[in-house]
């Protein structure tokens, strides 16, 4: 599930997917074919790109920067073994253009650099060869070859560095949950290969199979994909059912309806096919059937805004936080900050920080106040909570207790705008369709906070959070932030 894409609400295990329902005539109803995506520069240069346009542009810009820096360093320190300085931009551009034709950018950004050594070598050689032909009367062969070697080594070193540092952090912070369809030899081989790769950002949650008995690894049947995709926060389905096209199609239809990436094990003739457009997971060939379009550029700028704004806000509100901390310390014993376990994106737990606004043993007193809960559903909230201190009541009134959550935003656990993070005990009481609100990173403020902050309805809270997720864009975030500022200057109790 991605922000800005609505999902089918799932309210429990289903035995037949809606797309297989019968119409009045008895004919099977199938989803309408999707329109062809709009043409972009990436799609013109790569008719069938396997990466999204924005990451593709970032990869090109990164190579241009690497080639320019390494070439400039060579010109500075080894001028006799370098191309003339005015050829440097041309060399960088030609190399990246040849990289398009060689398929360098049509691979996973964190694929092994060893897989593209020959392609990178051809790119830099073709680039310097064209430059040499254009000015061969004034240029020896040594300088172009030295520039080609430097460019090749720089691009390869950059990729090894990115793979070593970047993929490890992605595997830790942005892992993708995978569900395997099938339980045969191919499915088991894929599972072993993913588990055996310490740098893989894929995490196998289990498999579904219509024949094997249910167990800790066999989570359900193919018909259960709808609710398993929600309950296990699945990002991608790998269909490993060679020789069973009907079951494979059923699984792919359900995965498509739930906006999941889909890869499948194809029925290939025996033999080695080095030119086949397939990927390998271990020794099992897989092809990509569908990949969800992710608003990478918007998400990138959202994260950039989170970093810049949270860092600036921490600096600007530092004196205010120091005063609040002093008042809390003077009024009651206990820690100044209150750190509680919250459930974040895709169900990942994290520690959310606030200024302590209650007595230090507030969590122990919560059970005795359950009968006074004034919110509907799993959320707990009461007016005039006896656990709140005098300072706590003041900082809650002006939302000053939430300032430490700017640190959570800086760390990446939260965003400035998003659904509010709920405590673990409240999430444990969610119904299955409520888990859709965990598709996006939680935020300090959101649509609910500026429109229905005092409403006791949990369903309204959920509806507003899901409305935000399904209609998310940067403009909506800006409107919510401006609305939050207006609320802050019109103090309301928390």
Image: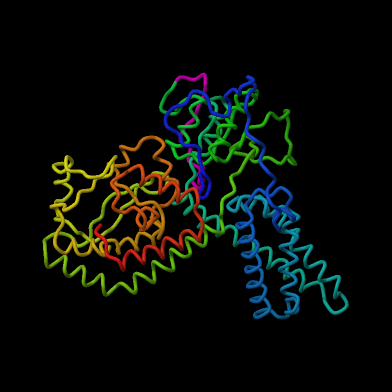
Q: Is residue 118 above or below residue 207?
A: below
Q: Residue at x 36, y 35 (%)?
A: 431
Q: Magenta includes 207?
A: yes
Of 316 and 449, the residue lying toward us: 449
Predominant secondary structure, magenta span: loop
Determine whether, in the image, residue 126 is placed left or right of residue 397: right
Residue 158, quarter of the rendered image: bottom right
Residue 298 at what x, y percent from top left?
Answer: 54, 58
For the C terminus, which image quadrant? bottom left
Expressed as whole percent of the image width and height from the top left, the position of residue 435 reads 40, 40
The spot of residue 187 in percent (x, y) is 55, 30
Q: Please, which colouring scheme is shown?
A: rainbow
Apparent side of residue 201 relative to residue 271 in the rendered image (left or right): left
Residues in magenta? 196-213
| Residue 374 at x, y percent in the picture | 22, 45
Q: Identify the residue at horizontal 34%, vertical 69% (top origin).
A: 314
- Asked if the magenta segment contains residue 400, the reply would be no
Query: How many badges with numbers are in the image?
Result: 0
Tell me if residue 113 comes above or below residue 158 in the rendering. Answer: above
258 left or right of 443?
right
Quarter residue 227 falls in: top left
At 56% from the left and 54% from the top, the residue drawn is 295
Q: Is residue 22 above or below residue 371?
A: above
Name of the residue lying farthest toward the right: 137
Is 466 on the left or on the right of 383, as rendered? right
Residue sitting at 56 percent across and 36 percent down?
A: 257
């Amino acid at each position: 599930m991605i922000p800005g894409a609505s999902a089918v609400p799932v309210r429990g295990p289903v035995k037949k997917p809606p797309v297989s329902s019968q119409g009045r005539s008895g004919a099977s109803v199938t989803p309408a074919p999707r329109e062809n995506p709009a043409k972009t520069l990436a799609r013109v240069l790569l008719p069938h790109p396997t990466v999204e346009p924005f990451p593709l542009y970032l990869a090109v810009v990164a190579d241009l920067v690497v080639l320019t820096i390494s070439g400039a360093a060579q010109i500075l320190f080894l001028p006799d073994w370098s191309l003339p300085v005015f050829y440097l931009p041309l060399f960088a551009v030609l190399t990246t253009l040849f990289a398009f034709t060689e398929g360098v950018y049509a691979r996973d950004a964190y694929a092994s650099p060893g897989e593209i050594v020959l392609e990178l070598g051809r790119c830099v050689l073709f680039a310097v060869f064209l430059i040499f032909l254009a000015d061969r009367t004034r240029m020896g062969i040594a300088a172009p070859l030295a520039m080609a070697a430097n460019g090749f080594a720089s691009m390869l070193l950059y990729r090894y560095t990115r793979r070593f540092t970047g993929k490890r952090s992605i595997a830790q912070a942005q892992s993708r949950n995978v569900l395997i369809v099938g339980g045969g030899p191919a499915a088991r081989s894929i599972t072993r290969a993913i588990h055996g790769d310490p740098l893989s950002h894929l995490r196998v949650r289990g498999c579904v199979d219509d024949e094997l008995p249910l167990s800790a690894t066999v989570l359900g049947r193919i018909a259960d994909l709808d609710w398993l995709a929600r309950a296990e926060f699945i990002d991608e389905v790998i269909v490993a059912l060679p020789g069973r096209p009907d079951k494979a199609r059923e699984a792919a239809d359900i995965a498509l309806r739930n906006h999941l990436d889909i890869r499948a094990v194809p029925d290939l003739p025996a033999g080695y096919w080095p030119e086949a457009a397939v990927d390998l997971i271990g020794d099992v060939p897989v092809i990509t059937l569908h990949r969800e379009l992710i608003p990478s550029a918007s998400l990138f700028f959202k994260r950039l805004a989170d970093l810049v704004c949270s860092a600036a806000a921490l600096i600007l509100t530092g004196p205010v936080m120091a005063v609040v901390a002093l008042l809390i310390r003077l009024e009651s014993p206990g820690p100044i900050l209150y750190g509680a376990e919250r459930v974040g994106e895709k169900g990942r737990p994290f520690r959310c920080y606030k200024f302590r606004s209650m007595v230090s043993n507030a969590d122990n007193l919560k059970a005795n106040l359950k009968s006074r809960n004034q919110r509907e559903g799993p959320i707990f909230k009461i007016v005039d909570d006896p656990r709140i201190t005098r300072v706590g009541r003041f900082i809650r009134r002006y939302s000053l207790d939430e300032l430490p959550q700017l640190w959570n935003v800086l760390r990446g656990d939260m965003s400035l705008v998003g659904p509010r993070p709920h405590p673990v005990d409240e999430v444990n009481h969610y119904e299955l369709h409520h888990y859709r609100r965990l598709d996006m990173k939680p935020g300090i403020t959101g649509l609910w906070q500026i429109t229905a902050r005092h409403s006791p309805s949990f369903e309204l809270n959920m509806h507003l959070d899901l409305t935000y997720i399904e209609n998310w864009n940067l403009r909506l975030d800006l409107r919510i932030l401006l609305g939050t500022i207006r609320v802050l200057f019109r103090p309301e109790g928390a």
